[in-house]
Image (spheres, rainbow, N blue to C red):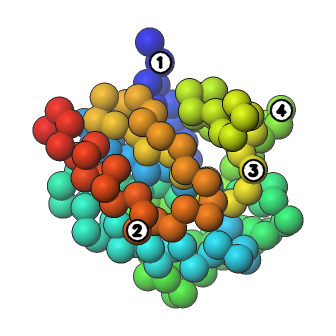
Amino acid sequence: MTTVYDFEARQIDGKTVPLKKFKGQVLLIVNTASACGYTPQFAGLEELHKAYGGRGLVVLGFPCNQFGAQDPGSDGEIAQFCQLNYGVSFPMMAKIDVNGADAHPLYQWLSAEAPGLLGSKNIKWNFTKFLVGRDGQVIRRYAPQDAPASLAKDIEAALTQGS
């Protein structure tokens, strides 16, 4: 059976990280953008990271420029933007595609495990979120408009599972 721990990704600094590094933790995986109407969600994601990080939550941000070209910058520019404007301290990964032939394998898997509305596997927009349990399996997919704070109850439940 495939789990999130079977994948690897590049961090925004270019270093490859096997996701098994996060084994036993709860992951909130989000495709992000720096110039989107939902960009202020970085603040809410950072709040979740600070509130639950000590209990085992890891927020992973994956910049993506596939929706309205809303993240055209380089990885370095994106990292600087997130830090300066939102104080982001959770791990940011290198920019990826989340849909199409060049979609990152992690996102191909996430989309298949937790399809969206009407069974669609495509990511519809920036700030689609996936909650992954300590066992490496997808618990739930959230829409871009779902505010990070609204995920708190599900995160709390995931943190108590298998801890």
Residue identified by numbered label 1: 2
Q: Is residue 105 left or right of residue 13?
A: right
N-terminal-most mark, 2 or 3? 3
Q: Is residue 107 above or below residue 137?
A: below
Looking at the image, which is closer to me, 47 or 146? 146
What secondary structure is found at the residue carrying circle 4? Answer: loop
Q: Which mark is residue 101?
A: 4
Q: Nearer the viewer, mark 1 or mark 2?
A: 2
Q: Amino acid at mark 2?
A: Ala
What secondary structure is found at the residue carrying circle 1? Answer: loop
Looking at the image, which is closer to me, 40 or 115? 115
Q: Amino acid at mark 4?
A: Ala
Q: Is residue 73 above or below residue 94?
A: below
Q: Is residue 79 above or below residue 96?
A: below
What's the distance in space between the residues labelled 1 and 2, CA to CA?
Answer: 29 Å
Q: Residue at x 81, y 59 (%)?
A: 67
Q: Nearer the viewer, mark 4 or mark 2?
A: 2
Q: Quadrant of residue 37?
A: bottom right
